[in-house]
Image (spheres, rainbow, N blue to C red):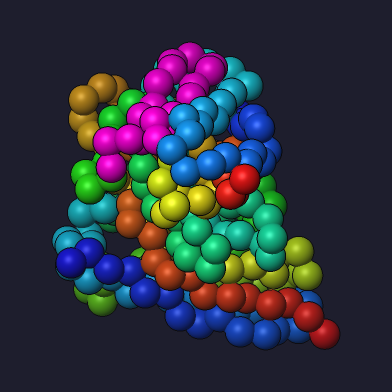
């Protein structure tokens, strides 16, 4: 079955870096775009970044632009999020999610499915 | 950026109740609107995509409607497993995705 498993979370000091990974299985990873979404403790969902199926395009939320980098290795079926210059406000559970779309219309309808179980990043001194 | 709002922010309901959650976009997004369910400590789960299409495996008591700026998620007969937080999400902008703030549904 389709599965996404995040790893790499932990406690990190402000200003330091961390890299998250998302291992995909059960589908042709190289055919799908992928997202990172985060959720601060007790808060709602915040989209972080997206990468196209071939890595050719990447887009970021303003809150992380210039500090975070999304990437992928299609030979390893793995998505990454490099997080630099971390701040206390980056503390959250980070989820990866597959980007699914349909060509019913142009541009295609698109949604996030499935999601991984999440990995917690805590930025604290 | 497209802003999403939801109402109410929370509601209390009983098993068997009909529940309606509203989502509004700051500009027209046609039918580029998705709904997710999240239970405590769990990842979100897709319920509805393209405003009204039911995701495979999701019970038919869930339905979505609307287009343009105003959308609704309806649960026709609330079940115990439906107590959760519900989020709308716009996918009209494929370079800036935004979620609504969420609606928490709990037991009356």
Q: Nearer the viewer, residue B87 or A15?
A: B87
Q: Nearer the viewer, residue B20 or B4?
A: B20
User: Residue sitting at 33 percent across and 35 percent down?
Assistant: B61
Q: Position of residue B49 (x, y in %)?
A: 34, 35
Residue A66 can be seen in this image = no
Q: Position of residue A100 (x, y in %)?
A: 29, 45
Image-quadrant location for residue B10 = top right
Q: Position of residue A104 (x, y in %)?
A: 21, 25
Q: Is residue B70 magenta?
A: yes
User: Residue sitting at 41 percent across and 46 percent down?
Assistant: B79
Q: Position of residue B2 (x, y in %)?
A: 60, 29
Image-quadrant location for residue A68 = bottom right
Q: Nearer the viewer, residue A74 or A96?
A: A96
Q: Seen in the image, is B61 located left or right of residue A89?
A: left
Give the vertical position of A15 relative to A104 (above or below).
below
Q: Which residues are magenta?
A: B59-77
């Amino acid at each position: 079955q389709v599965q996404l498993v995040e790893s790499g979370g932990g406690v990190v000091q402000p200003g330091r870096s961390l890299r998250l990974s998302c291992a995909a299985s059960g589908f042709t990873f190289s055919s799908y775009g992928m997202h990172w979404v985060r959720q601060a403790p007790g808060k709602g969902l915040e989209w972080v970044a997206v990468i196209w199926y071939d890595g050719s395009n990447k887009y970021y939320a303003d809150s992380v632009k210039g500090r975070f980098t999304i990437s992928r290795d299609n030979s390893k079926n793995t998505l990454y999020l490099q997080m630099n210059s971390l701040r206390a406000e980056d503390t959250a559970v980070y989820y990866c999610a597959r980007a699914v779309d349909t060509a019913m219309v142009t541009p295609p309808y698109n949604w996030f499915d499935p999601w991984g179980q999440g990995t917690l990043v805590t930025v604290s001194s | 950026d497209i802003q999403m709002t939801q109402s109410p922010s929370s509601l209390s309901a009983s098993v068997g109740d009909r529940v309606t959650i509203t989502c509004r976009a700051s500009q027209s997004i046609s039918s580029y609107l998705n709904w997710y369910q999240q239970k405590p400590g769990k990842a979100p789960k897709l319920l509805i995509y393209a405003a009204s299409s039911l995701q495979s495996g999701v019970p038919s008591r869930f339905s979505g409607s609307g287009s343009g700026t105003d959308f609704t998620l309806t649960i026709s007969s609330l079940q115990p497993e439906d107590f959760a937080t519900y989020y709308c999400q716009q996918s009209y902008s494929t370079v800036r995705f935004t979620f609504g703030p969420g609606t928490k549904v709990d037991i009356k």
